[in-house]
Image: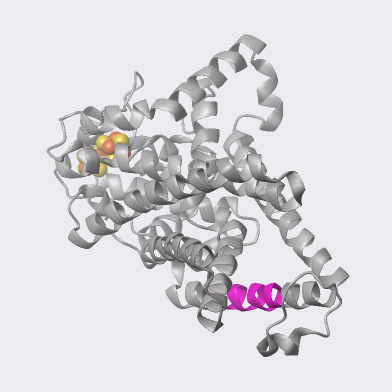
Amino acid sequence: MATKVDPQISQRVRELGAGDLNQCYHCGTCTAICPLSEGDASFPRRVLRNIQLGLGDRLVASPEPWLCYYCGECSDSCPQKADPGETMAAARRYLISKYDPSGLAGLMYRSPAFLVFFTLLLGALLAFFHLSIHVGKHAAGEAPFPSHWAAFAWIPYETIHLVGLAVGGLMILVVFAGLFNAARLMLKAHGGFAALRRYKVADYRRATMQLAHEIATMKRQGDCESDPPSSEPWYVQPRFTHGTILAGFVMLLIATTLDFFFVFGLKMQFYAVARPLGIAGGLVMLYGLLVYAWKRMRRATANTKTTTPADIWLLFFLIVLDVTGFALLVITAAGWKGVASDVILLVHSVMAMEFVLMFTLTKIAHALYRPLALFLHFLNAPKAGT
Ligand code: SF4
Ligand code: SF4
């Protein structure tokens, strides 16, 4: 495949937070020091070289930026202060923008104003339909009808229901489109999806087992942090706090699914499990989010040295989502009703829907792309640039 050179790549990745790669003279110290560098002695240097030379095709074809857990060892050791660790993080932001077929992720990373505008616009649209659903339910005799929502009464309930289904369908489509695009780009330099045929069933089984083990243990992140051993207490180390956010997210996902069955009539056996599971998940996740926020404020570690507006927005968004969830729990238990409880319900549900819709546009998308990249890595796909 002919190699295209895009001289703008370096500047684009720089705008997303990368270090000054003009300073890099490829001494190889970052590769030597990286706890995750394996046999071929070119990680993370190969990614830096692809950016430096403007080899965009090779950059998007490489799963390597996702193999880095940003321990910051390479940045601390770089004699040229080229910040290779932050450059790997910026490369991941660049890749998220390339995988996203809508182009919105790139705009959100580049423009804080667009980030706020898009969030508010999406929030306003979702709020409109959320309010309409209540009105529709009222029209169908299912829910109380606050008088201040009367303006929405003209939308037919069937239309609202269809829009809700469309939002759910759109979310599934967006996730699959992002994953498909990422896989397509990662495999493009190796002959496309046809390259997958060269692997045997045993290879897929091995790669799946390795991926499951990695997700369950976060071993690579642990290796990244333990060399040299971290001076932080274990309960604030990235592996633990990342684990709390992941575990909290999974618990909340299960609780929400059980709640869905409860709403649809399967009653108490689900409710009795869903509620405590949801509370535990919310608390565990809130702990991890607050530790991340505290570290970002103090810029205590290498991976919190650079904070983009998108990072602040995402942390704020998730903390508000979590806290309003608990506020709703208290309101429901106390039986409070009024404008304040309506507003909290509205904020929480709109943010929850928005979170789902923007999943592939933000940093959270690493939950999709890192496992994919790890799977291809475990499958021993040839690396871009070799
Ligand atoms: S340590 Fe610094 S100068 Fe050396 S190869 Fe890595 S980024 Fe370049
Ligand atoms: S940040 Fe850590 S894991 Fe990532 S490339 Fe640098 S040394 Fe390796």
**SS majority, magenta:** helix
Q: Is residue 269 left or right of residue 16?
A: right
Q: Which quarter of the rendering shows the N terminus? A: top right
- The answer to whether 148 appears left or right of 75 in the picture is right
Q: How is the image coloured?
A: one colour
Which residue is drawn at the image coordinates 68% and 55% (left, top)? 171
Tell me which residue sits at (31%, 28%) in the image. Answer: 36
Residue, x 32% and y 43% (percent of image)? 241
Is residue 155 visible in the rendered image? The answer is: yes
Q: Does the magenta stretch include residue 155?
A: no
Along the viewing direction, whichever of 349 and 312 lies nearer the viewer: 349
Q: Nearer the viewer, residue 322 or 173?
A: 322
Instruction: Tell whether 224 sits left or right of 160.
Output: left
How many marks overall? 0
Q: Where is residue 168 in the image (x, y as percent from the top left)?
A: 72, 56
Q: Does the magenta stretch include residue 128?
A: yes
Q: Looking at this rendering, what residue extends furthest in the front direction?
A: 334
Q: Confirm whether residue 54 shows in the render.
A: no
At x 50%, y 42%, the residue is: 251
State the extent of the magenta-drawn residues as a range.
120-131
Q: Which quadrant of the picture is home to ligand 1?
A: top left
| Foreground residue among 120 and 337 | 337
Residue 211 point in image, percent of width and height: 50, 25
Above or below, 162 relative to 187: below
